[in-house]
Structures are given as structure tokens and as C-alpha cells.
Amino acid sequence: AWSRLELDGRYSLDQDEPLLTDPLKKTYYSLGPKATLSYEFSNGMWTQFEYGYGLEEPSFDQLKPVTIMNSQNSLTMGNPDLEPEGSHEINANLFYRNPANFASMSIGCWGTFTDNAISYNRIISWVDSVGYVNIYKPFNNGASTRINAWLWSDIPLIRTKLNLRLSGNYYITKSGSYINEDLNTTTSNSYTLRPGFKITPGQKLIIELSGSGTYTKTNFTLGYVSSQEIY
């Protein structure tokens, strides 16, 4: 698919007031190819693969050439020089169903790999009579990655009466931004497990029991930014 987007932004204190900055005019062109491949095997199994590429333009908040005071010690600035993000998206799935005992399972993985990813850099400076001031401004800071792998299963333990349902996923994200002149790369790994049971005592009564647990660990490459663990 091909698309063209035009942005025209003007900033003033009121509609009839003089402009605070030069008008913001941007034109973005996007060519987004997509492909899907599916195949069904003869043993109750089938698979699907998808690929797509697209561009995502910066938001108006990220582009606007004005400074917003969040507090006395925090400012957010726009960046009219931002370029669009380009993302490759991949999705692969495998499905299986046994018609004899009604067992089923699926596994899959999707990933988004972004070029020119937009993230907010942080500049810390000292201002007399105010103290440390944090200035946040968006930039194209290179590549970012998001990958999610998952598993789902439904296994009969007692046919038509008791089923074990087990699923889980692994999710990883990686992105970068600068604190002053130092690049800080953030990597987050998350693991989730969801066990459960489906109990069918009779035709009119179904009982489902389930639970889930998640462990997440986030690491930063800068030594003065502490890693985080969340359960």
C-alpha cells in the first residue's frame, strides 16, 4: 500500500494572535508491502507466516517547536526535524488439533524491528536558584526491537471431563536513548506462565480454574541507572 500524509501546524496563543514560531509543514510518503503465506498439512496441522513493512510518522506533540514546562525542574521540547520510523513486522504461527482426542496446541512468534526509532533524550543541567533541570526532547535514536514468543495448549486428561490448559509467553524489548551525551540502552525480558483446568461435570455445568505469574527484569547499560525486577 502507498500513502501520502501532509501535516500543517501553526502555533499561537490564540487563533487570531501572531504565530509563536514558523509554520510546521511536513509531507511523508509511505510504501508498505505485506505478504501472507498459509499452508495446511494432512495431519491436523497448519501454519501461517506474515510479513509487513510500514512507516509511522512522528506525532504532533513530538514535532511541535515549543517548550512545555511540566514543573519548575522539568521541561519537554518538540523536535520538528524528526523523521518517520520504519518497521519490519514478522508473525509466524503453527497450529495443531487432534480430532481423535480433541487435543490442540499452537505456538507462535511475532517481532517488530524498527529503524530510526523515536525516543526522548534527557538533558540534565544545573540552573542557579532552581537546581537540577531535566529537559526531554525526542530524537531518532537508532533501532528498537520487540519480540514475543508464545505457547498455548489444551490437553484432555479425562476425555470430555477434565482438560489441562497451559500457556505462556516470553516478551523482550530493546531500545535506546541518551542521558546527556551517554547512550542508555534499555532491555526488558518478561516471562509469563498461565496454567489452568477446564472441568465439565455435566452438560450444563463448566468450571474453569486458572492463574498466572509474570517475572520481568529490566536492565540499563548506564551504571548509575538501577536495574529493575518485577514479579
Image: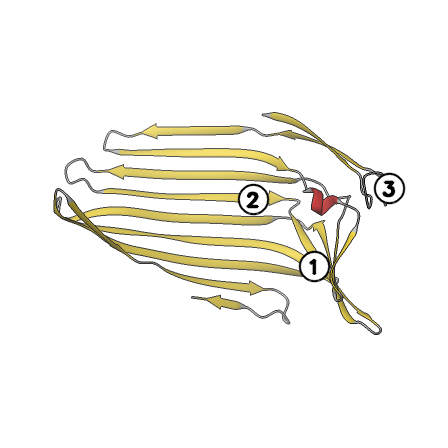
Q: Which residue is mark 3?
A: 17
For residue 173, side relative to residue 182 (left or right): left
Circle nearer the N terminus (3, 2): 3
Q: Secondary structure at mark 1?
A: strand
Q: Amino acid at mark 3?
A: Glu
Distance Cα–Cα, label 3 vs label 2 = 43 Å
Q: Residue at x 52, y 67 (%)?
A: 228
Q: Amino acid at mark 2?
A: Phe
Query: Which callout, 1 or 3, points to the residue nearer the camera?
Result: 3
Circle nearer the N terminus (1, 3): 3
Q: Amino acid at mark 1?
A: Tyr
Say if mark 3 contacts mark 2, CB within 8 Å.
Answer: no
Distance Cα–Cα, label 1 vs label 2 = 20 Å
Query: Which callout, 3 or 2, points to the residue nearer the camera?
Result: 3
- Determine whether 86 is above or below 193 in the image: above
- Determine whether 176 is above or below 5 in the image: below
Q: Residues within 10 Å of mark 1 (few under 14, many from 20)?
A: some
For residue 16, side relative to residue 219 (left or right): right
Q: Is residue 97 visible?
A: yes
Quadrant in the picture for the C terminus: bottom left
What is the x, y in percent for residue 107?
Answer: 35, 44
Q: Is residue 158 visible?
A: no
Residue 190 — which label? none
Q: Secondary structure at mark 3?
A: loop
Q: Which residue is mark 1?
A: 178
Q: Residues within 10 Å of mark 3 (few under 14, many from 20)?
A: few
